[in-house]
Image (cartoon, helix red, strand yellow):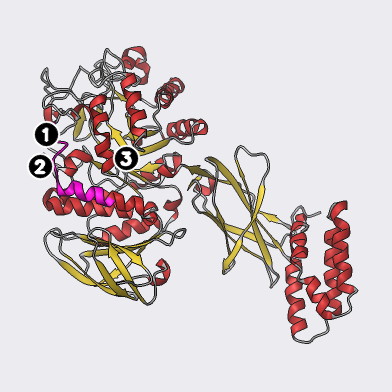
């Protein structure tokens, strides 16, 4: 006997989303549209039906959701998840003999052909379905079969055949032995809205004091919360807040010689006072930190904590667990290197240690400790220098019990490595946006992020700068470049961030020969006039308000690019399907010259009006009457290097 499901004729293939064949879950956001798709077809001309079996991982019972036919054998289900955590799904399909019969019956009836035999065939199909029904439903189904063969007029037979209740019953009572179920079960993880829409501001708490020359504290940061909130940020990110190593401490501008007054780099974690579960005493107490977290939430701000899995030479781990580090032949521990850079004040963990299990458990306990203290967002420093297997295990364990926790991967490295970190569980990722400076580069990079399978697992967080990175684009472009890069980051990606004080105050002096800030705050305490006015700060606040008020900017993947006759202008459309909110963004990529050109908008793809419509610039308040696809834009960078145009229909004066 042939051991093969030979009666199953339907093919189910090309299921999406699936990451590495189902090895990793796709990403979704609670209550946002999540599309499951597949190609489902059969031989011949019979009708096919497809559905998705779906359940939350905590549920015991699978629920079935019918898929919608799109075109060319392609089917989709639009699902709006209501629970955080992991969902599982399978796709199935089968030949729908009842619908095939019913369509043929109607065609023959409308053509005036004899349908007596067809009615008998239909009755037979219904009787077969009735045999699969329970006692309660069987009689009602059989009555439908009798109606087909015992009617006074053909019109009555057609009415009986097209009855919606009958169709529902036949769907429910299909022959399950003939259903093709795709053998693999796939998964997706549902996360909170902030995982996909967030606005980050980075500052060093030790530079938060209003008094020059004084070490800042958490209480000083608390006084800045109204300012951060007024600028429109919802995530306030701190570099590491732990005790800083005293051995091999770096001085100003990464000098190997530190003075008594040099505070050292916060990323050189740990000294005689403690390590990753301790707080730098000059910042305040643990209670001060928790009070700050609570106060920030009153402004709808979450405190994001930096976790750098590395140690200063005098971190307690070095003496307590020497097996977790690499020891050199001269009896010293191998410090961190990224040639030609040397980090003598930092010791990396050895993830190939034979004691790896205890190392993993201890590193996870650091996250658990700070979650218990109220932290829900972690920016992970240099995750690409740690084991992928560790991240997959640690993040999975943490988010199983705390699905609200967000991990941001700070990894500027090779593409496959960044992608693997995202697959391993990081909710957001740093990107190459910082070095994409032309209209062509922007379009190509956004297409890669949003129109390929990366959209299902890699969530970009765009940063124009960081404490380590001062790009030449903003070094030489000055205020205009700062405003342009801000607008690009904030409108291209639903999550973006700024290393704030230097950005809003327009500080642009680099270290000679490097893409890095001189007098770097990583190595010294800076004083900022937090009450000073800058135009950059004003535009930051305006753009963040626009983001909050326009759902179209709260999604990264809804972007469609326009063509432009001037390569110095990049133009794109973002549409929110739920609200109909539509924005057209045009940006001058030239910091010094006015640029103009005609843009050709993707009307059909973006769902824009075909005829005349009004657009209002949310940056300036100006209104323009546009018509159809081709329209003219002109941007003077010294006035404003961009338009953020809201489509308003019907046209108004």
Q: Is residue 54 at all visible to an observer of this figure? A: yes
Q: Residue at x 33, y 70 (%)?
A: 601
Please name the residue that numbered disc 3 is placed on. 411
Disc 3 or 1, which lies upstream in sequence? 3
Does residue 511 belong to the magenta stretch?
A: no
Q: Which mark is residue 29?
A: none
**Residue 373 location (% of width, % of height):** 40, 24
- Range of the magenta residues? 527-543
Compute the Cα span from label 3 to label 1.
Answer: 24 Å
Q: Residues within 10 Å of mark 2 (few under 14, many from 20)?
A: some
Image location (x, y in percent) of residue 294: 37, 29
Res. 349 in view: no
Nearer-the-camera pick, 621 or 152? 621
Mark number, residue 519: 1
Judging from the image, what secondary structure is the residue with disc 1 in? Answer: loop
Q: Position of residue 118 (x, y in %)?
A: 83, 76
Position of 373 with respect to 486 (left or right) is: right
- Residue nearest the viewer, comparing 133 with 92: 133
Front one among 523 and 341: 523
User: Which mark sits nearer the N-terminus, 3 or 2?
Assistant: 3
- Name the residue at the front extreme: 653
Q: Residues within 10 Å of mark 3 (few under 14, many from 20)?
A: many
| Front of the two marks 3 and 1 | 1
According to the picture, the residue beneath numbered tag 2 turns out to be 509
Which quarter of the rendered picture does the C terminus lie within? Answer: bottom left
Regarding mark 2 in the picture, which secondary structure is present there? loop
Image quadrant assignment for residue 214:
top left
In three-dimensional space, the C-alpha distance between marks 3 and 2, rounded to whole angstroms, equals 24 Å
Mark 2 and mark 1 lie on one chain; the one further toward the N terminus is: 2
């Amino acid at each position: 006997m042939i051991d093969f499901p030979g009666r199953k004729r339907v093919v189910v293939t090309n299921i999406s989303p699936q990451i590495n064949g189902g090895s990793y879950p796709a990403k979704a956001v609670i209550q946002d549209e999540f599309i499951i798709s597949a190609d489902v077809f059969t031989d011949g001309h019979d009708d096919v039906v497809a559905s998705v079996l779906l359940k939350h991982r905590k549920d015991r019972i699978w629920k079935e959701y019918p898929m919608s036919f799109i075109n060319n054998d392609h089917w989709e289900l639009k699902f709006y998840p209501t629970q955080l955590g992991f969902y599982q799904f399978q796709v199935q399909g089968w030949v729908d003999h009842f619908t095939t019969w019913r369509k043929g019956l109607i065609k023959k009836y409308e053509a005036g052909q004899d349908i007596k035999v067809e009615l008998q065939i239909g009755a037979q199909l219904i009787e077969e379905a009735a045999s699969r029904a329970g006692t309660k439903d069987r009689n009602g189904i059989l009555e439908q079969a009798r109606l087909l063969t015992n009617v006074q007029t053909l019109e009555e037979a057609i009415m009986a055949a097209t009855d919606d209740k009958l169709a529902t019953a036949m769907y429910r009572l299909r022959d399950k032995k003939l259903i093709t179920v795709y053998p693999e079960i796939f998964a997706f993880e549902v996360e909170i809205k902030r995982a996909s829409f967030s606005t980050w501001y980075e500052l060093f708490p030790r530079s938060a004091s209003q008094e020059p020359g004084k070490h800042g504290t958490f209480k000083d940061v608390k006084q800045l919360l109204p300012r951060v909130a007024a600028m429109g940020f919802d995530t306030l990110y701190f570099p590491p807040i732990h005790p800083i190593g005293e051995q091999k401490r770096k001085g100003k501008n990464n000098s190997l010689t530190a003075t008594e007054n040099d505070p050292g780099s916060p990323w050189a974690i740990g000294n005689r006072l403690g390590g990753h579960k301790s707080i730098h005493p000059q910042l305040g107490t643990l209670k001060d930190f928790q009070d700050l977290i609570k106060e920030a939430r009153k402004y709808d701000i979450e405190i994001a904590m930096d976790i750098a899995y590395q140690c200063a030479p005098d971190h307690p781990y070095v003496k307590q667990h020497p097996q977790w580090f690499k020891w050199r032949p001269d009896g010293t521990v191998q410090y961190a290197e990224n040639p030609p850079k040397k980090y003598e004040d930092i010791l990396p963990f050895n993830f190939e240690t034979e004691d790896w299990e205890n190392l993993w458990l201890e590193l996870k306990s650091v996250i658990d400790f700070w979650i218990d203290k109220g932290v829900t967002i972690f920016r992970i420093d240099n995750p690409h220098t740690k084991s992928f297997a560790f991240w997959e295990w640690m993040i999975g364990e943490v988010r199983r019990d705390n699905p609200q926790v967000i991990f941001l991967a700070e990894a500027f490295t090779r593409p496959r490595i960044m992608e693997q970190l995202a697959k391993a569980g990081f909710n957001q990722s740093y990107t190459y946006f910082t070095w994409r400076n032309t209209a062509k580069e922007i379009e190509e990079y956004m297409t890669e992020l949003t129109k390929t399978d990366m959209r299902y697992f890699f969530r970009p967080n765009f940063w124009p700068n960081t404490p380590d990175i001062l790009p030449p684009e903003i070094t030489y472009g000055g205020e205009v470049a700062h405003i342009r890069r801000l607008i690009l980051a904030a409108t291209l990606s639903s999550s973006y961030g700024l290393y704030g004080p230097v950005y809003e105050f327009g500080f642009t002096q680099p270290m000679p020969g490097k893409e890095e800030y001189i007098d770097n705050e990583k190595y010294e305490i800076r004083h900022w006039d937090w009450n000073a006015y800058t135009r950059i700060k004003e535009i930051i606040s305006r753009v963040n308000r626009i983001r909050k008020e326009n759902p179209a900017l709260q999604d990264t993947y809804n972007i469609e690019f326009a063509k432009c006759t001037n390569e110095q202008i990049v133009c794109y459309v973002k549409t929110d399907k739920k609200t109909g909110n539509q924005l057209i963004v045009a940006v001058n990529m030239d910091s010094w010259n006015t640029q103009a050109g005609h843009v050709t908008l993707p009307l059909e793809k973006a769902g824009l009006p075909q005829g005349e419509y009004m657009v209002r610039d949310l940056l300036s308040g100006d209104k323009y009457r546009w018509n159809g696809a081709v329209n003219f834009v002109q941007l003077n960078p010294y006035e404003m290097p961009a338009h953020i145009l809201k489509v308003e229909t019907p046209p108004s004066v």
